[in-house]
């Protein structure tokens, strides 16, 4: 067991050397780091508690979410009744409910049966088993009300908050390098922590709009004025255009009568990028639909050549161009009075997907970098003091073997940093605490091995036989003990967030590197020492060292 082949020795040394080289970029100046090739530009990021940054607590607008849900319920109710061939004279929103007026009151029971297909049972929450909407007959004959239930609204808000987290992450950190911490708090609030950001203005701009993009048919037969004087046609609504005071052409607010149900919406976008118009050189947003969206948009434009259609963003009409020819390529562009910055922000919002509801800032603050530097300095001091105490104890208790264990512990720390660097992990203050803890855990395995060697020596075995037995027989015990801690760390990583996750990362990585350094690096050092000694010179110093305590 103490014999190492040349290939195995070189492999161990290569791993240790690679770990040392991987840590180097963390200690280089910014200028030197940027001069490195792209494949070598990896660093450990610093969390909010070490680097400072922005802290935002945002709340979902439940009223906006409910309004959007009611609109979808109205469209679904209209479609279900048409499929069931039940006549209705009106389907509209009244307060917090959808009201349906049937042509024939005697069709009420059949209509309710058809509308019950819209009811969904809530599952997986404290409202499990409850219905999300309630359907009832109104006070007048032929009047039916479809109304969201309180459990349905609460479940919808919580689900919207969960689905918003990834959208927010894609907007704030589209490249995945900022290491923002975004978690849900309570039922309808989302905590956003962005390291290294001192001004939250840009973040609030990116999150200020839901970015719901849709394309609608414009009613060319009925004017907006006529619709206002009389009655808005069923299935249509009036929307205003987006006003830009800096552009005379867009400074006048216009109104459009558009169909409520979109031809295509933002969920059918596959890409959106900021660019420049080739003729006017103005900033634009180029977009492309997925296969389904391209098919629907192509069929619509082919059937409506010569008619206008509206491009709508967050209930504001961006433009209403006339279809000159069928658009079958599945791509297009949005032009307007954009700057390079606003065009890029809108492209990011469209790529990330629409937020299900508006977000409002509840709490906003910044964490200063000075606090972070104090934490880093305190963490360094704790790591150094912890390492010195551990090394001192090991050398006192086990002599030369204790020095080998200390070298293994140092390499353990290096390898933890190396893996975190390659993975692009973020270092937090609890993460530093995890590293300090694993320094002690790193030599704990060696303590078990050395105590086993001491026991074998007392039983009369030769030094070489005792060392071999110590490494071999302690292996199972150490793996079992470390495995339980590893499982606990893995659970914290999977279920925790923020500081808990930072601690779990260094703890789990530390356990893996501990097993490597204790059973491979330390054993290799002992093997080299044995080869450098003559057999007759091993007994006395080893027996003396192992019998001291």
Image (cartoon, rainbow, N blue to C red):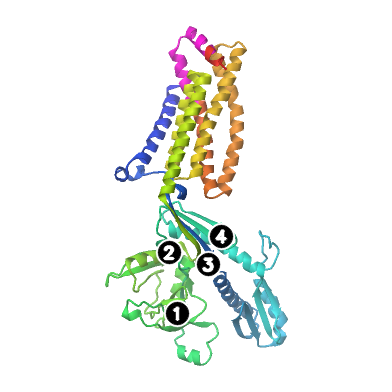
Q: Are discs 2 and 3 less than 8 Å apart at CB?
A: no
**Mark pair 2, 3: CA separation:** 15 Å
- Measure the C-alpha gap from mark 3 to mark 4: 10 Å
> Gap in Å between the C-alphas at discs 3 and 1?
31 Å
Q: Rounded to the nearest whole Å, what is the CA distance between mark 2 and mark 4?
A: 18 Å
- Judged by depth in the image, the label closer to the viewer, 4 or 1, is 4
The residue drawn where x is 49% and y is 24% is 392
| Contact, mark 3 vs mark 4 (Cβ under 8 Å) | no
Q: Position of residue 154 (x, y in %)?
A: 63, 66
| Residue under the point 53% across and 90% down | 231
Rounded to the nearest angstrom, the CA distance separating label 4 from label 1 is 39 Å
Residue at (60%, 41%) from the top-left corner?
488
Residue 206 circle label: 2
Magenta span of residues: 520-543
* Residue 408 horizontal side relative to residue 137, left or right: left
* Magenta segment includes 524: yes
In terms of sequence position, does the residue under pointer 4 or pointer 1 come before the other?
A: 4
- Name the residue carrying label 3: 356
Instruction: Name the secondary structure under disc 3.
Output: loop
From the image, tell me which residue sits under label 1: 303
Q: Please report whichever mark, 1 or 2, sits nearer to the chain's N-terminal start.
A: 2
On whether residue 179 falls in the magenta region, the answer is no
The answer to whether 35 is drawn above or below residue 347 in the figure is above
User: Which numbered disc covers residue 162?
Assistant: 4
The answer to whether residue 286 is above or below residue 447 is below
Q: Whole-Å distance between the Cαs marked 1 and 2? A: 36 Å
Quadrant for the C terminus, please.
top right
Binning the other alpha carbons within 10 Å of mark 2 as few (below 14), some (14 to 19) or many (20 upward) gives some
Task: Find residue 450 and report its horizontal and vertical position in percent.
Answer: 56, 21
Dividing the picture into quadrants, the one containing residue 60 is bottom right
Residue 114 quadrant: bottom right
């Amino acid at each position: 067991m103490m014999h190492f082949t040349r290939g195995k020795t070189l492999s161990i040394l290569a791993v240790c050397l690679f770990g040392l080289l991987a840590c180097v970029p963390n200690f280089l100046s910014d200028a030197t780091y940027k001069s490195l090739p792209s494949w070598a530009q990896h660093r450990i990021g610093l969390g909010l508690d070490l680097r400072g940054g922005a802290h935002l607590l945002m709340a979902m607008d439940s009223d906006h979410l409910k309004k959007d849900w009611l609109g979808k319920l109205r469209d679904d109710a209209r479609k279900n009744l048409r499929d069931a061939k039940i006549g209705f004279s009106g389907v509209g929103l009244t307060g917090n409910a959808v009201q349906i007026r049937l042509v024939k009151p005697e069709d009420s029971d059949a209509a309710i049966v058809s509308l019950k297909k819209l009811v969904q049972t809530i599952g997986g929450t404290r409202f499990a088993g409850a219905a999300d909407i309630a359907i009832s007959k109104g006070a007048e004959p032929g009047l039916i009300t479809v109304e969201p239930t309180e459990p349905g609204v609460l479940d919808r808000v919580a689900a919207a908050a969960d689905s918003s987290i990834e959208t927010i992450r894609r907007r704030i950190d589209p490249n995945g390098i900022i290491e923002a911490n975004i978690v849900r708090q309570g039922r309808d609030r989302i905590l956003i922590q962005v390291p290294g950001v001192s001004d939250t203005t840009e973040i609030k701009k990116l999150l200020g709009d839901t970015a719901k993009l849709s394309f609608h048919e414009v009613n060319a037969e009925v004017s907006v004025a006529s619709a206002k004087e009389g009655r808005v046609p069923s299935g249509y609504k009036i929307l205003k255009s987006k006003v830009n005071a800096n552009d005379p052409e867009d400074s006048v607010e216009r109104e459009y009568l558009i169909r409520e149900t979109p031809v295509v919406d933002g969920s059918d976008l596959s890409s959106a990028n900021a660019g420049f118009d080739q003729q006017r050189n103005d900033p634009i947003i180029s977009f492309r639909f997925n296969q389904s969206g391209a098919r629907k948009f192509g069929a619509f434009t082919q059937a409506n050549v010569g008619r206008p259609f509206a491009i709508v963003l967050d209930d504001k009409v961006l433009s209403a161009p006339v279809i000159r020819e069928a658009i079958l390529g599945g791509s297009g562009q949005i032009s307007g009075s954009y700057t390079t910055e606003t065009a890029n922000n809108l492209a990011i919002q469209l790529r990330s997907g629409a937020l299900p509801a508006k977000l409002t800032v509840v709490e906003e603050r910044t964490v200063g970098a000075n606090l972070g530097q104090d934490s880093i300095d305190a963490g360094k001091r704790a790591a150094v003091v912890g390492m010195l105490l551990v090394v001192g104890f090991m050398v006192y208790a086990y002599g030369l073997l204790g020095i080998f264990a200390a070298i293994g512990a140092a390499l353990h720390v290096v390898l933890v940093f190396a893996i975190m660097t390659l993975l692009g992990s973020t270092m937090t203050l609890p993460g530093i605490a995890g590293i300090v803890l694993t320094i002690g855990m790193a030599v704990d395995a060696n303590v078990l091995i050395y105590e086993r060697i001491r026991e074998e020596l007392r039983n009369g075995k030769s030094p070489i036989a005792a060392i071999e037995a110590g490494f071999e027989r302690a292996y199972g015990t150490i793996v079992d003990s470390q495995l339980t801690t590893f499982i606990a760390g893995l659970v914290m990583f999977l279920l925790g967030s923020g500081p808990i996750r930072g601690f779990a990362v260094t703890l789990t990585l530390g356990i893996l590197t501990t097993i490597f350094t204790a059973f491979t690096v330390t054993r290799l050092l002992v093997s080299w020492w044995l080869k450098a000694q003559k057999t007759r010179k091993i007994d006395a110093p080893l027996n003396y060292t192992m019998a001291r305590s």
